[in-house]
Amino acid sequence: MSTLIEQLKGQIIQELNLVDLQPADINPDAPLFDYDGLGLDSIDALELTVILSKYYGIKVTDPAQMKKAFFSLATLAEFIAEHQSAPVAA
Amino acid sequence: METSITATCAIRGRQIFLNGTLLFEAPEDTAADLSDFLIAGYRHFGVSYPKFFKMDVLSKLAFLTAELLLPKAGLQDRLRPADIGVVLTNRSSSLLTDVVHQQSIAEPASHFPSPAVFVYTLPNIAIGEISIRHQLTGENSLFVTESFEPAMLVPYVSQLLAEKSCQACLCGWLEAGLTGHEAFFYLVENHASPAPTPRPHRVPDVELLYSQPHYS
């Protein structure tokens, strides 16, 4: 799981243009959509769904279930681990 | 009502001017890429606004120009947010971002359009970024014209001020295209402005300021 979290950190920094952040700055348990965490917004939420599709082959079909998955990096990694059928090339 | 130009800010090439004074000049190696140059300026002036990094280059250019101009003018201390308008013009619309978006959907096999890119495929989003940052809720428009045309812009803004649609207006030229970039913003206020050396808001004066960014 820790490898997946580290991988996600890099993908989120790259795809969401968080160029001032280093992977070590991201607390896996901090809320993604809260200014105490990464302070992401609704467009970033869409970008996260693109990351899920692009890198993990996961299509989001039920946006309601993503509220829990998008809470933190750790919950997102758990969601990926549960739903990923096969790795997708980055 | 007599209106005055009370401040200017220009970003040209790798230089940034405020009221005719050169504030920042990026090293040549930084200036090769517009985004890198604007990030260098952002860091030079100690701005703290993480969303800046997510913006496309047109919005970055608009944001940085307004960021240098508006706080020093102190408009928000004197006027309500609804009394401050923004009227900009440019030639290339959002072409640079349009190209990035088009490339992301060109290959059906790797069809991953980015929402964060797509949201900037309208040039007036740059005005939105300025408005969000400075809490401006007044009249705003962005016109696409072949070149900077004070003869069109000055009467339009004068009318806004005359009919009291706003009491002050951030105006100018905001261009980022395939052949280069340029931002020239100026602030127009009614005659009550406290600026020490206001210039009349007339076409020749705007043309002079635009052609001579060093003028102060």
Image (cartoon, rainbow, N blue to C red):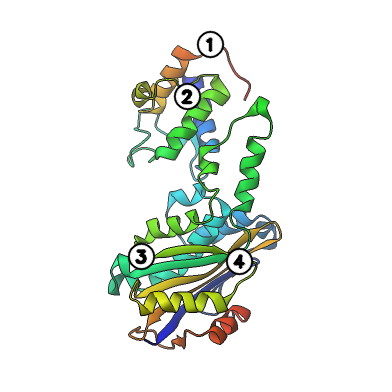
Mark 1, residue position:
A85
Secondary-structure class at tag 1: loop
Q: Which mark is residue B138?
A: 3
Q: Which residue is located at x 66 percent, y 54 percent?
A: B33
Mark 4, residue position:
B145
Of badges 2 and 3, the one in the foreground is 3
Q: Nearer the viewer, residue B34 or B105?
A: B105
Task: Tell me the subunit letter for badge 3.
Answer: B
Amino acid beneath label 3: Gly
Secondary-structure class at tag 4: loop
Task: Tell me the subunit letter for badge 4.
Answer: B
Task: Give the percent coordinates (x, y) of residue B6.
Answer: 43, 81
Q: Nearer the viewer, residue B149 or A43?
A: B149
Q: In this rendering, does residue B215 appear at all?
A: no
Task: Tell me the subunit letter for badge 1.
Answer: A
Q: Nearer the viewer, residue B35 or A26?
A: B35
Amino acid beneath label 2: Ile
On screen, residue B97 above or below B22:
above
Q: In this rendering, does residue B165 appear at all?
A: yes
Please check whether the numbered discs 3 and 4 fall on a single chain: yes
Task: Give the percent coordinates (x, y) of residue B93.
Answer: 59, 57
The Cα atoms of the two marked residues, 2 and 1, are separated by: 17 Å
Task: Give the percent coordinates (x, y) of residue A62.
Answer: 40, 20
The Cα atoms of the two marked residues, 2 and 3, are separated by: 44 Å
Task: Tell me the subunit letter for badge 2.
Answer: A
Amino acid beneath label 1: Ser
Q: Which residue is located at x 46 percent, y 63 percent?
A: B141
Q: Quadrant of residue B10?
A: bottom right
Mark 2, residue position:
A5
Q: Which residue is located at x 40 percent, y 38 percent?
A: A42
Q: Which mark is residue B162?
A: none
Q: Earlier in the sequence, mark 2 or mark 1?
A: 2
